[in-house]
Image (tube, rainbow, N blue to C red):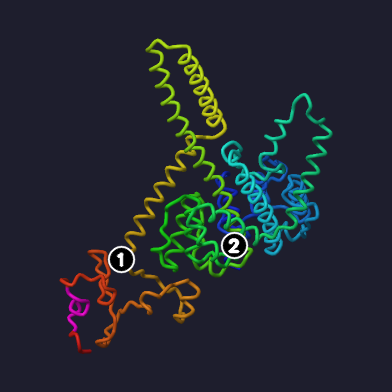
Amino acid sequence: MLTRKKAYTIWVNFRLISKDVQLKNAFVELFRGTNMKLFVDVLIGADIKKLGSWDNLSSAQQVTRVDWVMDELKEAGILQNAFYCESPALGRGAYDEVEWLLWHLVKSDLFRIFEYTIAYAEDTNLLLNVPFNPIFDIEKPGASASTSKTRGLFSKSDADMEEDRLNEEERRSSWRSKLKPSSTCVDLVNKYITCISEGKSVVGYFSSLSDLKDTRVLLTLVNSIYGDIFTPDIMLNDKWSVNLALEAMCNILRINSDFDSEDLVMADNQAMCTYLACIFNKALAFRQADKVVKRLAALQEKLVVNNKELEEMSKISMSANESRQKKELHLKVEVLKKEQERLESTYDIIKLKVWVKDAEAEKLRIHGVVAYRLKQRFVSEPIKRPIVISNLIDSQYINLSLTNAAFYTSKIKETISPTRRIVLYDKKEDKFIDDFSGFRDPELPTARELLHLPENEM
């Protein structure tokens, strides 16, 4: 239940960040002040002034506002017309009803993301030309662009086009009703990891959301969002690797998240679907940002080369054939300029470049963190509650395959047998010292020598 609360709060905050509002607990704070109004506003992309603040409302007023919210969400196509909730309970922020509403919103969000992912995969030009819209939209991705192209001498009448739109919406509703959130998330993960070469060898390890804690799958997913961040072969399948992968993914995608390895282990399908809905929302937006920035760089490079050729041609006398080539080159430059201008007018290029630059900086930071940890070899973890070692390993996803044992910090005098393994930490040099991992410099003193302990005595 705690993991669900965390996942829903991350998803709600992802939506509210454009309004400069962040909640600590979506179940408690969503129906306070103007939070619900702002939340609905960002979902449908409109300002619903009549909702106002939720504070100091009578029970009847709360029910009225819940009805308004349901009407707006259903009219926007976010909730199905058959959706039902207990208005009085939802109006006062009852946990079960809030969860019921949020879960249906998350499902709708997942299906919308899945449609965009399929559309972008089928037509790569859509990713460049059709901006990913974080607002819930009724039309299929790219539908408005394709519809506008049919307008002409032999285009359909407005009535026929409206009928086609309604039929398409009915088909989409029927298609969405057959989808399951968990299987949709599994399909999305597979579509991402199989788009890179290393993912083809990993896809066999992923068949359910619980498999996402496998670092081979998780690290490959992060690499598919922004490549070459991790080398899965050198990363252990453990808590530290999982937490670093989640941290890197959320930093690159600019998601405020405290979801960690323990949540990944303990989460049920509902919590995982909610978390992944947030991830895939931002992943699509980032993929588009990366592609637009790279395309603009390619266009600029081509323009420089072509303009240089035109400049060279203008300095010499040309034959008829060369004059024709010059005209073709002029036309090519104009086409490139028009595409450049269209991209610059469609997207906020400065923000996209900053986002991609920040992602590259995060990748370099992660490389440094991994190199440092490989050098350190050991990780110190605080134990917040009394727990047996087997339960600690399962709940926090700790891997002891290299040491076959866990170590503890000794703060009292103890009897140390000759066979007991010791790990020392040098605070000044920021390094661990041991005698069993094979990484010790033979010219340096052993751990027992540093503690002034005889080799074969207690």
Q: Could you say where residue 56 lies in the image, as x and y percent from the top left? A: 69, 52
Q: Identify the residue at horizontal 70%, vertical 64% (top origin).
A: 96
Q: Which one is nearer the viewer's eye here, 327 or 248?
A: 327
**Disc number placed over residue 298 in the picture, else none:** none
Q: Identify the residue at horizontal 67%, vertical 61% (top origin).
A: 99
**Disc number placed over residue 272 in the picture, else none:** 2
Q: Identify the residue at horizontal 46%, vertical 52% (top origin).
A: 251
Q: Which one is nearer the viewer's eye here, 331 or 418?
A: 331
- 308 lies left or right of 65: left
Relative to residue 314, is residue 265 depicted above or below? Answer: below
Is label 2 in a helix, a strand or a loop? helix
Q: Could you say where residue 118 lies in the image, as x and y percent from the top left? A: 64, 48
Which segment did they paint magenta? 445-453
Q: In the rendered structure, which amino acid carries the disc numbered 2?
A: Met
Q: Which residue lies furthest to the left in this view?
A: 443
Is label 1 in a helix, a strand or a loop? helix
- Among numbered discs 2 and 1, the one appearing first in the sequence: 2
Q: Could you say where residue 277 lies in the image, as x and y percent from the top left? A: 60, 55
Which residue is identified by label 1?
376
Q: In the rendered structure, which amino acid carries the disc numbered 1?
A: Gln
Relative to residue 364, is residue 231 depicted above or below? Answer: below
Q: Quadrant of the C terminus?
A: bottom left
Q: Could you say where residue 141 lies in the image, as x and y percent from the top left? A: 66, 42
